[in-house]
Image (spheres, rainbow, N blue to C red):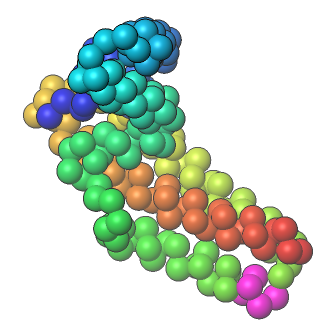
Amino acid sequence: MPSEYFAFYGLPESFHPDEAALKRQYYAKSRETHPDFHATTSADNQAEMLRLATLNTDAYRTLADPDKRMAYILRQHGLLEEGKQEQLPPDFLMDMMDLNEQLMDLETAPDTAAVAQVSSEVQAIADTLDAGIEPVLAGYEGLPNDHRAAALQQIRTYYLKKRYLLRIQQQVATFAARS
């Protein structure tokens, strides 16, 4: 299933798209669809140019941001649903129990050293996740279609874990600001 935003720019679906080509396409589409160039055309044409200009802006904002791009690709393949509570792997949640307990302790007894320790642990987990998924992201575009589903499942799991860790990092930052 091709991604509408990638097709709009004539680019292959990729977690690491050619950023220069993306930017070139964005500016070219911006010039093509800018309302000022269509002010004297029919109302239907003006409405269509406005729709395309909006699509261009949305597409670029999404594809230029690695996190938004990842979520977009996963949604396009039906692997991420807006507003739905996604299930994380049980082994990951078990690993997170210790961090969550440390966070509860920080809530009752703020401690600068403990905040730094939790922050360091979360960063180490995030770095390990990033290193583990990078070859999958880099190689995705070159995969045959029948191998992409497995890669997308790995990427989905990574994405959900990263979102979970981001929430923990936000809590840690809140505790750090207090202590």
What kind of secondary structure does the magenta stretch mostly adopt?
A: helix
Q: Is residue 69 above or below residue 174?
A: above
Residue 66 in the image: x percent, y percent? 49, 36
Residue 160 in the image: x percent, y percent? 41, 58
Residue 32 vs residue 159, the one in the foreground: 32
Residue 137 in the image: x percent, y percent? 38, 33
The residue sitting at 54% across, 49% down in the picture is 128
Most extreme residue toward the left is: 146
Q: Is residue 116 magenta?
A: no
The residue sitting at 33% across, 59% down in the picture is 82
**What are the residue bounds of the magenta stretch?**
105-109
In the image, 122: left or right of 107?
Answer: left
**Which quarter of the figure has residue 94?**
bottom left
Q: Quadrant of the N terminus?
A: top left
Residue 144 in the image: x percent, y percent? 15, 26
The residue sitting at 67% across, 86% down in the picture is 104
Query: Could you tell me if residue 14 is visible in this image?
Result: no
Query: Could you tell me if residue 100 is visible in this image?
Result: yes
